Amino acid sequence: MTTATLSRWDRFRDSFLWYSFKRDKVAIVSFLVLLLMVLAAIFAPLLAPTDPYDLALINIMNSEMPPLGMEGADPAFPLGTDSQGRDMLSTILYGTRVSLLIGFGAVVLQATLGIVLGLLAGYLGGRVDSLLMRIADVQLSFSTLMVAIIVGAVFKASFGNLMFGEIAIYMLIFIIGIAEWPQIARTVRASVLAEKKKEYVDAAKVMGFRTNRIMFRHILPNTLSPIFVIATVQIANAIISEAALSFLGLGMPETQPSLGSLIKSGFDYIQSGSWWITLFPGLVLVVLVLVINLLGDWLRDVMNPRLYKG
Amino acid sequence: MKSDTPLLEVKDLDVRFAVRGGDLTALRGISFSLDKGERLGLVGESGAGKSVAAFSILNLIASPGYIAGGQILFEGRDLAAMSERELRKIRGNRIAMIFQDPMMTLNPVLKIGTQMVEAIKAHRRISTKAARDIALDKLRKVQIPSPEKRLDQYPHELSGGMRQRVIIAIALLLDPEIIVADEPTTALDVTIQAEIMALLLDLCEQENVALMLITHDLGVVSQVTQRMLVMYSGRIIEQGPTREIINDAQHPYTQGLINALPQMGEPGARLFQIPGSMPSLKNVPSGCPFHPRCNFATDQCRQTMPEYVHSGNVDVACYEVSNLIEQEKRMQEAGS
Amino acid sequence: MLAFLVQRISQAVLVMFVISVIAFAIQDGLGDPLQQMVGMSVSLEDREALRDELGLNDSMVVQYLRFAGNAVQGDLGTSYFYGKPTLEVISEHLPATLELVIGSSLIIMLLSVPIGVYAAIRPQALMAKLFMGVSTVGISIPVFLTAIVLIQIYSIGVTVAWFPVDTGWGQWLNGALSTEGGLPSYGRGDELTHLFGTWYSGFFSKNGLLHLVLPCVSLASIMLPLFIRLIRAEMMEVLQSDYIRYARAKGLSAVRINFLHALKNTMLPVITVGGVQIGVMVAYTILTETVFQWPGVGLMFLEAITRSDIPLIVAYLMVVGLIFVITNTLVDLVYGLVNPTVKLTGKKA
């Protein structure tokens, strides 16, 4: 008796994931909005009317112009300008790009770190486990945002303002990645400890596989499912962390604005009534984080085996 | 034998589950009755619907289950149609329940005493002290050593057997008319099972409490119950005096169940198994649900659900049985 | 119980040690203290002599031991900017932050339990869905943004003119949506009541309370939705358990089942998570204090970073580390006392 082998696409279409995605309007809308924002960010250079990084183009005389619909608006700057005369629309597009880059980058870093360290701690146990978990505990009790602030402060002071500004994106990815590895590591470690007891691990050991191979090719795939949910939410967290750091002055420099630093500069001018400098980047930030959170919620519900109720 | 007005009478009870894509029927029009002080066994494999039947009496089926039709008459009133407020007065008070796993049934963060006193005070206006006294009295009845200590302990501090004794004590607190016990010994060690079952039997006899015992264990049923009913795929296929059914089961399924008992086999021979398995709620066969696994299945079995026929003191729903009875009658008439 | 305390205290000491090492290492990496203390015009020999005097040429280990020894005695250095012992500076700023945290925690505790429980017992109700929707949006808004928006609405005031001003309903809608502002958004005000030592409280005067409103609401705004979601999720799971069904089978009232049987089990994991959130809250106070120029330790820390006031930075880290260690131990203790299945021998059942 032969069964036709389904292609990957067919299997995906048949899967519960796709089925439940199609039925969940919130998930669909969130995904579309996210896709839109990601595309806008990727094609920012093409879409933005001006290049906000080009210092030569910025004219301080243009500063604090209101968005279309209000007095004194200029169609060349549909969303108004910020305190330095940069076009809001362009800056927001580039800022979204920075946020997404840092968000994804930081999560990739923390996932890699977290998975590797979690595997090591769980599989090797003993002193390695104790040490790693002790560090994780200290980091977690400080809260990852605090750790990010401290590390950010130290780096900024060590590298100096100028140099920090030049490599800010990489610094931020590094800082947030380092601050957030414990959560993933803990989850992976818990999974590893559970899997270690299962028979297929004994079988692999008996067959003489090396530790590395057992860890990565046998145990790891079984621990990945909760990681997907966590990673999604962590992207949102990373974006907020970057915004917070930039707001505090420990993140992206003035010359490479991100949504967070835009909000900060807007705040400085809030008393003068230029609310658009804060509100528009703020709105974009909230929508971005919101749709990622919603997708994360949906993913968590889908992966939860208990939720088969009508 | 059976009195005119039974204590509990279930008529055509229909229980369904509302899931995506339509409702699934868990109980299809089942009917049975329970007299005062009578001990009734509900027997069947997992998935037959016996637990659903037990929980539906007090309308405690977990959502998305609901009672779709039928009546549950207790002392003349229909429990299926009662409001939650009215039902609450009966739960634990006139009809008590014993669940399967005592570790999951007792709230882990509350003391035993708290959980016993609250059961009493929910239905009687008496002081906490008086309630504690009643609790102590019942704890002694279930033969728990040092009952005063137990009241201040937490569930995890007691052994499995002791916890189930506490559950039995709680069931007896308000001197109910009926105790519905859902697999009361399944989660316990084998050595304790017999003790607990014997205790339950004794207490029911002493206090003249009716017992509805849900179990898959035919041995327990034969020792404890006076009448039994056998469930298959949401229907009662055979019901009557326990002795008669155990000694001479008529429905092919019941026969299969009894033959499958290790005691019935010969040493060294293969154990008997009914081929196939109980259909899930989604794949209920047409007509008699047992026909795919039945040696005697005919076309008639595949098409329509058989009605009950009376054979001896037993009610059976099976065409084979009804046909045999027809044959006998005709032979008798022909012979005379 | 004693064994538990001993174990936790020794753990705490270990953690403090790690934190002190990190703080010390940071101090080392944050720049040359000499540069802060004396100008450029001091000669090289004088500098070297100064270094020797200050012990900056000793080995790392010796310097650390000196640092740790001083710390244990309560001397965490002198702030460059304030010219006072760092602990003094910290103790002057700490009450402000504490009041901020207390105010927000009150809001969170008073609101999260009723809303979370309600959303769990009636998940299909419109109000419940509304609360949950707002909560999801709430956790997506960073705390500083909420603070700024609140300032705009309640401090500066918003004049809405979207609806036609020449109609009665237009004017009414405009008026209803506009705000005058007026709530203070800067600092703590000048009517603080002296309680003891360096603690000047804002809770006992109208002016002080007014100043507390916006900051506390901002800080609560990020944590409240989190707790609501948490309580709702935990409670919904608890409500599915066997012992809840059994409680119903005993004929207990819904109030007793929800608020005793279910709630007690729900709050246990909430306590654990709550403990972790304390750390998060401290980070958020830094953000909130920045927006409101609230003179607490968060703002102090940030200013210290900008000014490269290294002793103050290090002292802040040590103090915050100590606070975390103490609160985490307290949370574990409370959890052990409340959860009867946990034996306080240091092991969890």
Image (tube, coloured by chain):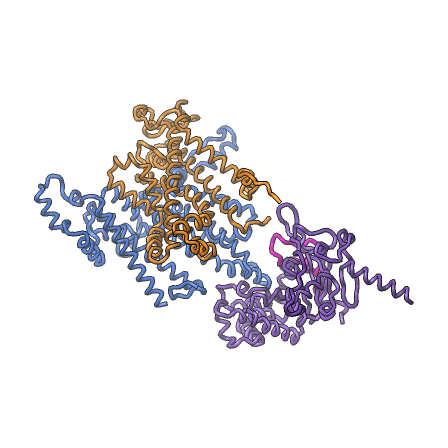
Chain colours: A orange, B purple, C blue
Residue C217: x %, y % from top left: 40, 46
Task: Kindly indicate the quadrant of the structure image that contains residue A166.
Answer: top left
Task: Kindly indicate the quadrant of the structure image that contains residue C335.
Answer: bottom left
- Residue nearest the viewer, comparing B54 with C263: B54
| Residue C205 seen | no
Q: Is residue B296 left or right of residue C93?
A: right
Task: Kindly indicate the quadrant of the structure image that contains residue B227.
Answer: bottom right
- Residue nearest the viewer, comparing B112 with C20: C20
Is residue A170 positioned above or below B184 on the image? above
Residue C330: x %, y % from top left: 36, 60
Does A55 appear in magenta? no
Q: Quadrant of the N terminus of chain A?
A: top right
- Residue nearest the viewer, comparing C73 with A106: A106
Does B71 appear in magenta? yes
Q: Is residue C29 left or right of residue A47?
A: left
Q: Work out which residue is located at the far top of the displayed protein and give it.
A: A75
Count of picture labels = 0
> Which range of residues does the magenta coloring cover?
B60-84
Which residue occupies 38% across, 46% down? C219
Q: Work out which residue is located at the far right of the displayed protein and give it.
A: B336
Is residue C172 positioned above or below C280 on the image? above
Residue A214: x %, y % from top left: 42, 51
Which residue occupies 54% across, 56% down? C239
- Residue nearest the viewer, comparing C295 with C224: C224
| Residue A54 seen | yes
Is residue B294 positioned above or below C312 on the image? below
Residue A28: x %, y % from top left: 52, 38
